[in-house]
Amino acid sequence: MHTYIIRRLLYAIPILIGVNLITTLLFFYVNTPDDMARQILGDKNVTAESVENWKREHGYDLPLFINNSEEGLSKITQTVFAEKCAPLLWFDFGRSDRNNIDIGSQIRTRMWPSLAIAVPTFIVAIFVNLIFAMILAYVRGTYLDVWGVIFCVSMMSISSLFFIISGQFVLGKMLKLFPISGFDTGIYGIKFVILPIVIGIIASIGGSARFYRIVFLEEIGKDYIRTARAKGLSEGKVLFKHGLKNAMIPILTNVVVALPFLFYGSLIMENFFAIPGLGSFTIDAIQSQDFAIVRSMVYLGSILYIIGLILTDISYTLVDPRIRLK
Amino acid sequence: MPVVLSTDLIMYLLVLMVVYMAVLVRRDGYIKDAWRTIRSRKLAMISLLILLTFGAIALADSIRWRDAVTDEDGSISHATDGSVIYDMRPLTLLDRALSELRTNTEKTFSAPLATHQFTKEMMTRADGSTGRDYPPLKYPGTHLLGTGKVGNDVLFTALKSIRTGIIIGAGTTIIIIPFAIFFGVMAGFYGGLIDDAIQYIYTTLSSIPDILLIVAFMLLFGNKGFQGGLVNQADTLLNFFVLNDRLFWLCFIMGITSWTGLCRLLRGETLKLREMEYIQASKAFGVSKSRLIVRHIVPNVMHLVLITMVLQFSGLVLAEAVLSYIGIGVGVEIASWGNMINTARMELSREPVVWWNLLGAFIFMFALVLPANIFGDAARDALDPKLRTK
């Protein structure tokens, strides 16, 4: 088990280097530092001198991968890749291109609002969907089940943007139940986070509930359920006690991989509700074309994804002792 | 003067695939059986009918040509060297068929089927007095879904968006199918170092957050080339083919983010097939490896490709809306439901509310994605029931 986790972590290193290489190529090779300087300084009145100055100030005046003007080891270390991208490997995010803010400290402060929205949405959505799916599995084969599935598929066919826009409009603007957008810390923040959480849960209902229902139905068809029924257990006990436990395996794998991304927040949701989390941080960086921030967020996202995969494997062994990781 | 975009080619390819499937349904035993299962489900058949209608509209919107510019007296104008001058803006078959909807524009907003404009203006009334009032529309009662900010017919915009939706939903998968088959089958068949290398590539690609990869790519490639309106002579090949099409790049990069799932699926299936008796038998007969792959493995994984294509369709259509909202989608000049929702967001904060752009996008998107979901499920169940929980 421990050796397995260590091996997986070691395997993550080449992947993270690969991610780093791809983003470096994307951001520097095609969009050269000269272009970046011009975009940031503004297209008008840009002299070659001011572009050079900007590049020197931000450390983009070095060659991309190999510096031929240097000797020995600094041939590799005195490059954009080594100076700007490789430090990401040890979580040194550097400063943003546009306002020269410390990206690392931004990430540390902005992850809390993201968590304040994402964690409650995640937990409540799982409960709501599990209960909904179990009810559908309980009434399987009846008209209620058919209409429940049709409802799920219909919910899946609606863009999340509709849920956000109409939720904001109906609950925020017409009924005035919640403020339309904004954020506050502490106890005052509660009224701001309820609306995004509610909308997030509603938007998740279709796909997850339908998936959980299929998992339940598959579990119900197995022999041990028949044995439990033959023992004379009530249908509710069969379903909720025996079925649920075993159905948790596929459900867990589906859920755990998303766990690390709770830090990351939801890009769209945070942008709509003006929540100062990591999601809106990323969107703002995209819209102002601040590549230092976008690069850091790409890297952070990749780390979280890899952590998610490892957590998934570990959770397998926790819920199903038959699985041994080698 | 015909104009063919690279995304038009995708559309033609899609039509060819549908025709090919229709031929297979009559001949091939396996597809025939699957078709019989699908046909017995009434909802799936209705969905297919709706999808085909949408497809026909999208096809009509993908056949385009440029008209010659005419002088005021109606004769064709010529350049100084005697060649005919063509309009920069190609019109599609759909534009021409619905030219009334296209050209009957109003000045600004008007509600569905309204006879008067939505906003007040200084005007002279029938009795001669002047004041602020709602002016009558030029074409009262003809705009089924009202008109937008610049007076465009919302129904027409929504109809034009169908092509965008279908290209993104289906074209994205079409572009990456060859890569996914090549890498997936190679990894599964040869194993060892090749397998490790390919697995490394797709794990790396899939660990980059999709939306950020798309953003980076579109910021770099999206703003050059054809954006949807005018065709620049510089962008054309042989005077009619436009390769550098923003929509094409969007499909391409969305494909890159979604091919890993298909690749992994194909690898697993090939691993399984490699050990089957019929493959072992062919090996014993001395069939070459390349022939083994082309003749015996690839045809037997095609159903997975087909299933992935229908199942990915709806998700991709929905993703377009989100991307357009962030501003890295199809661009403002191409009609799309994402753009409609994006403008609707501002319109909802007006007083009184302008709601018909949102409604139009909602109805059309729902009408495409719901049948796609229903048909996708039916097709998966018919082709490979074991895939249900994946």
Image: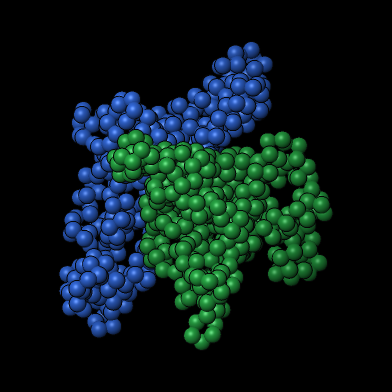
Q: Nearer the viewer, residue B295 or A313?
A: B295
Q: Position of residue B17 (x, y in %)?
A: 69, 58
**Residue found 58% across the figure and 64% down from its top:** B64
| Spot occupied by residue B26 in the image (x, y as percentages of width and height) | 82, 52
Q: Quadrant of the N terminus of chain A?
A: top left
Q: Is A64 placed left or right of B107 in the picture? A: left
Residue B192 seen in render: no
Residue with the most extreme bottom position? B81
Question: How many labels were placed on the picture?
Answer: 0
Residue drawn at x 37%, y 29% is A170
> Is residue B105 toward the left or the right of residue A300 in the image?
right
Q: Is residue B56 left or right of residue B342?
A: right
Q: Residue at x 30, y 26 (%)?
A: A176
- The hue of chain B in the figure is green
Q: Is residue A68 above or below residue A316?
A: below
Viewer-proximal residue, B181 or A283?
Answer: A283
Q: Is residue A56 left or right of residue B41?
A: left
Colour basis: by chain
B359 or A318, nearer to the observer:
B359
User: Residue A213, percent across and down?
Assistant: 57, 30
- Relative to residue A200, is residue B63 depicted above or below? below
- Residue A62 seen by the camera: yes
* Residue B154 location (% of width, % of height): 48, 46
Q: Nearer the viewer, residue A114 or B89?
A: B89
Is the residue A90 above or below the residue A145 in the image?
below
Q: Colour of chain A?
A: blue
Residue drawn at x 23%, y 31% is A189
